[in-house]
Image: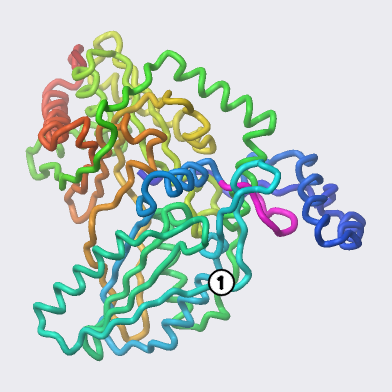
Amino acid sequence: MAARTGAGADRAPAASAATGSGTDRALAALPAAKRELARMLLAARSPVPARPAPRSGAGPVPATALQARLLRRERHTDPGTGTGSYAVRLTGRLDHGRLREALTGVLARHDALRCRITDSPDGAGPRLTVDDAPCLRLTRTDLSNRAAAARREAVRRQITESAGTALSLETGRTSWFRLLTLAPDEHVLVLASHLGVFDGWSSGVFLTDLAAGYRDGPDTLTAPELQFTDYADWQRRWLASPDGVAELAARRGDFAAAPAAPAAPGGFERGHLPVRLDRGPGSPLDAGLALGATRGATPFMTLLAALAVVLGRRDGSPDVVVGTPAAGRFAAPLEGAVGQFTTVVPIRIDLAGRPSFEELLHRTRAAVADALSHQRLPVDELFTGGTQPYSVLFALHNYPAVPFGLPGIEVSPLPGPPARHLELYSPDPAATFACVGLVERDGEIGGTAEFNRRAAAPEDVTTLLTGVEDVLRRAAASPAAPGITF
């Protein structure tokens, strides 16, 4: 579920010490080597707003907690783990020069697409450095002289290879494009991006900007109101502020009694399974969602309540914690920036007292609202040292639909390999049973379950979903009957 909350970002007072004209003149008089340090010291003395705001000055900023974890994994475990891939078919006369210029313009617009992560010389941890000039990595391959079947196979292979490209946060090689020419009026554009700088929401931002740059020219692409570096700088300062320290401590207290999810003895080995929930007149899913709607619950809340029942029965516990990926763009200006803002929000569902499903929906609504109000807390700061309390992740994605159009060109998405998200969403992937990611589209609900083969078999994941449908069937028949949980 890509949650969207919040309005405009809070702004620092115009007369603050870090932005006053006298201070700016004093900073300008300092040697360049000392100027940015002075800005950082002044910023540290200023109150930290509750939401990100444009930062004062330039220079490196601390990497986010998630980026620091991905960097460690990239260095020591699996260099290819952090790569995501997206492909679109372009049908029509494509101007290669305009496309190249538009791609370069999008890279120039977003700091996240020009950054590297390096170690701080003072040992303060990894930091983001933004390169001034964009570096477009674009490979062009002409497949037009091959037979139709050979072209299809080559496209499939290129998309698969793109998803396996080993990108690098450390070197700044965080994106790679492939343009495949199938015919004079047919192309496939494939984007490989590092998940440390590019989340699911970013794909819509990127495609919108690419269309504008191709249509109107790259000079029309002005910088977004907030950059990812503004967010990263704010996150570290806010976590160290009194408000951040207090919220983190209180939230840790909320989960102090929840047992940590045990790591699978064999560690982690990825598996994927396509999943679909049956819909149609009279189906358990439709009946359950209709019941939820009458009780003010969204489809996500209704499915989450049913999943909590299944997990509670499986574990024999009335206290269930499910992790859900949230967009993390809790300030409206962040919605226009490319970056990795995703966080995992743990949701604690109370099944105690043999509630009816109606009562459980009420509890779930309250739990979801409370959990989403804490999107500012990165999961890597919330759960450290093997304390992750969830073994199952669940999402019903609602990324905004983006009509991507180029002048004279029809654009359509192409399916690609399943995403690799367990390492992104879990501080310890070995402690995760499965991540079920669903999308509601054209009246259907389906998607992919990514699971840990060392902890589960495909039929174990299927059992979770058939259990959800069974709970919804019983709930629709007797929504007020007690004892839905056990």
The residue at 23%/38% (across/down) is: 451
The residue at 48%/82% (across/down) is: 101
Visible residue check, residue 7 = yes
Residue 74 percent location from the top left of the image: 43, 49
Q: Quadrant of residue 442?
A: bottom left
Visible residue check, residue 333 = no
Q: Nearer the viewer, residue 462 or 333?
A: 462
Q: Which residue is mark 1?
A: 108
**Residue 58 vertical position relative to residue 72 in the rendered view, above or below:** below
Q: Does 54 appear in magenta?
A: yes
Q: Seen in the image, is 479 located left or right of residue 396?
A: left
Q: Seen in the image, is 203 located left or right of residue 341?
A: left
**Residue 222 vertical position relative to residue 434 in the rendered view, above or below:** below
What colour scheme was applied to this rendering of the protein? rainbow
The stretch in magenta equals 53-63
- Furthest-front residue in this view: 76
